[in-house]
Amino acid sequence: MNTFALPIPNGGAVKIPVSGCGGKIIQRIQGDAGSNFSKASCMADADADLVLQSQNGDPSAFEVLVQNHQQMIHALTFRMTGSVADAEDLAQETFIRAYEQIGSFNSHAKFSTWLYSIAVHACLNWRRNEARRFQAYAHCAEERSTQAAATESSVENELVRHTQEALMRLPAKQRAAVVLTVYEGLNHAEAARILRCSEPTVSWRLFSAKRKLKRWLTADKRAR
């Protein structure tokens, strides 16, 4: 198995195992990974110990944090981008930023929530690039269909594809609110902290997003 090395400011590197198909921090996650927020909550105590070890200069502890949370972060970045390749890049970027900023992590917060915040804002910045936005939208259906083909029926596959396409049509901040609350199971207060806005703002974004999704998916169903 290959490794990806994160440089350490005072010399050396953290070596993180990756798949053999390229220099990625995370391995490619096939299919819909589902919500992992509840699983992450169960690991909160273990995370706290690993974070403390990482802050004290133990590179192997951060490697374990990556392994524990890579699926959760990849699922989020895929839903935000609709692109397998971009989701992998953004998940990698998330862990690089987390490694660089681990010294500033507040131990009173959940490590998983902190990672969500880094990942969501990396995705929001990604969305500002219009060229990549339209490229991802164009390839979304094809990539999603390929991912799910091995495990889903054709009907389920079509539903997943149309839902993801509709999700990609939402404004980025509305989509982030849907991903965090509907897919990842966060409450409005937690989502508001990650998105750096008020709870009423999260509620309004969700209300508006759900109306649009319902309208688009209903129209799409009638068209078929």
Image (cartoon, rainbow, N blue to C red):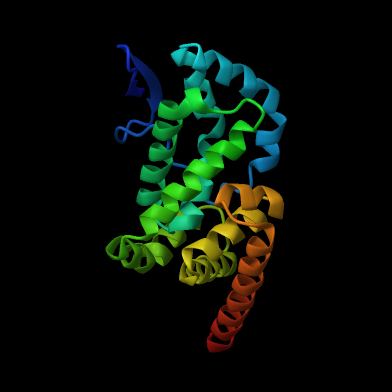
Rendered location of residue 191, percent (x, y): 63, 51
**Residue 33 position (above or below residue 171):** above
Give left or right: position of 54 versus 130. Answer: right
- Residue 184 visible in the current orientation: no
Rendered location of residue 39, percent (x, y): 68, 36
Kindly identify the residue that appears in the image at 56 percent across and 29 percent down.
68
What is the total number of numbered labels drawn onto the structure image?
0
Give left or right: position of 154 versus 181. Answer: left
Name the residue nearer the viewer: 94 or 25. 94
Q: Quadrant of the N terminus?
A: top left
Rendered location of residue 65, percent (x, y): 53, 25
Rendered location of residue 185, percent (x, y): 69, 50
Quarter where residue 89 is shown: top left
Name the residue nearer the viewer: 70 or 27. 70
Q: Residue furthest front?
A: 198
Name the residue nearer the viewer: 29 or 215. 215
Kindly identify the residue that appears in the image at 34 percent across and 68 percent down.
138
Give left or right: position of 157 versus 59. Answer: right
